[in-house]
Amino acid sequence: MSGYLIVFTTCDSQQCAEAITETLLQNRLAACVQQGGTRSHYIWQGEQQQAEEITLTIKTRAALWEKVEAAIRANHTYDTPEIIAWSVSHGHAPYLNWINEVTA
């Protein structure tokens, strides 16, 4: 794999979000983690649910995908966490260079 990823996950608490964020940054698996609030509506175990969640948008290199996914799973409170990645097809070169510089 080459290039860059935007990885997305949601958490049920600020504590979960901070644990994932700190693990990713301290281990240089992400250059940036943005946190924001969202209201999710979904089907879980056959029932319609809704919850306040914290979204994490993670900027990283594609080569780090397996380590990023493992770090999220290790710190997540959900049985089946949402962990989705999008490939970055284009980006501002200085920003992408910064991602290279600050990730492992």
Image (cartoon, rainbow, N blue to C red):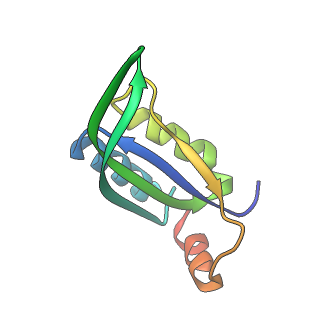
Image vertical order of residue 56 relative to residue 32, above or below: above
Residue in the foreground of this view, choosing between 77 and 30: 77
Q: Position of residue 6 (x, y in %)?
A: 56, 58
Residue shown at 51% from the left, 56% from the top: 29
Q: Position of residue 39 (x, y in %)?
A: 30, 45
Q: Can you tell which quarter of the image residue 90 is in?
A: bottom right
Q: Position of residue 87 (x, y in %)?
A: 67, 58
Residue in the foreground of this view, choosing between 92 and 75: 92
* 56 with respect to 14 (left or right): right
Q: Can you tell which quarter of the image residue 52 is in?
A: top left
Residue shown at 42% from the left, 33% from the top: 74
Residue shown at 54% from the left, 41% from the top: 69
Image vertical order of residue 10 relative to residue 89, above or below: above
Q: Position of residue 3 (x, y in %)?
A: 71, 64
Image vertical order of residue 80 relative to residue 103, above or below: above
Q: Can you tell which quarter of the image residue 93 is in?
A: bottom right
Image quarter hosting the C terminus: bottom right
